[in-house]
Image (cartoon, rainbow, N blue to C red):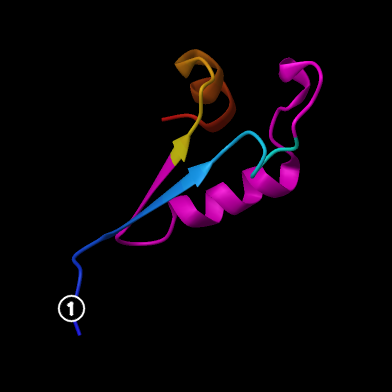
Amino acid sequence: MIEASSIALFLDYDGTLAEIRKNPADAYPSQEIRELFSILADTPRLDVCIISGRKRADMLDWFGA
């Protein structure tokens, strides 16, 4: 078995974490998603990456750095 010093988790935003909406601005993250990312951010040795075609500014506004 190979041991990793850290793990990277890549998650797609639109259509996976958030439902597709007619107006893309309406596809902001739910409270449940925000809570999930808070838990993931506190997990040692876990790097979480969100894959999205959205503007970086929007993603930073919603999820922070």
Q: Which quarter of the rendering shows the C terminus?
A: top left
Is residue 4 or residue 23 the one in the foreground? 23
Q: Report whether 18 appears left or right of 56.
A: right
Q: Quadrant of residue 18?
A: top right
Is residue 59 or residue 53 the one in the foreground? 53
Horizontal and vertical percent position of residue 42 = 44, 56
SS of the residue at dot 1? loop
The residue sitting at 69% across, 35% down in the picture is 29
Q: Quadrant of residue 19?
A: top right
Disc 1 residue type (three-letter): Ile
The residue sitting at 54% across, 56% down in the picture is 39
The residue sitting at 20% across, 85% down in the picture is 1
Determine which residue is flagged by label 1. Answer: 2
Number of callouts: 1
Q: Report whether 12 appears left or right of 3.
A: right
Horizontal and vertical percent position of residue 50 = 47, 38
Which span is picked out in magenta?
20-49
